[in-house]
Image (cartoon, rainbow, N blue to C red):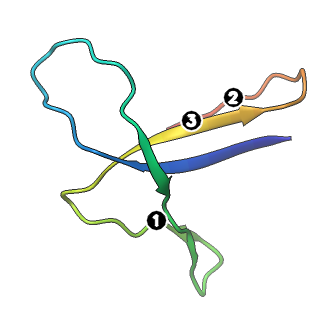
Amino acid sequence: AFNVSFQRTIRVPDDGKARSLPPGLGTFPLAQLDDGSVALPMYQAEAMWMLFDCRARSAFAVKI
């Protein structure tokens, strides 16, 4: 199984410096739309990072 979660986090400065991963502040909710697609509602000022989790020893390709 392969899972992706979208973690709410703090914004970090875009100054070119290497930084550690900011803390996760919970997951963003996903909303299923009438046409079957999924939307991730967030404000422009919010930030997120994506958590990829694969428990099986299988290869997966992710296109973003």
Q: In x, y percent, where is residue 40? A: 46, 65
Q: Which residue is mark 1?
A: 40
- Spatial separation of the CA atoms under disc 3 and disc 1: 17 Å
Task: Give the numbered dot on residue 1.
Answer: none
Which of 39 and 13 lies nearest the eye of the viewer?
13
Q: In x, y percent, where is residue 25? A: 43, 51
* Category of crowding for the residue at label 3, using alpha-carbon neighbours closer than 10 angstroms: few (below 14), some (14–19), many (at least 20): few
Q: Amino acid at mark 1?
A: Leu
Judged left or right of residue 26, residue 16 is: left
Q: In x, y percent, where is residue 28? A: 48, 61
* Category of crowding for the residue at label 2, using alpha-carbon neighbours closer than 10 angstroms: few (below 14), some (14–19), many (at least 20): few
Specify which label sits upstream in the sequence, 1 or 2: 1
**Residue positioned 25% across, 12% down in the render:** 18
Judged left or right of residue 25, residue 17 is: left
Q: Amino acid at mark 2?
A: Ala
Q: Which residue is mark 3?
A: 63
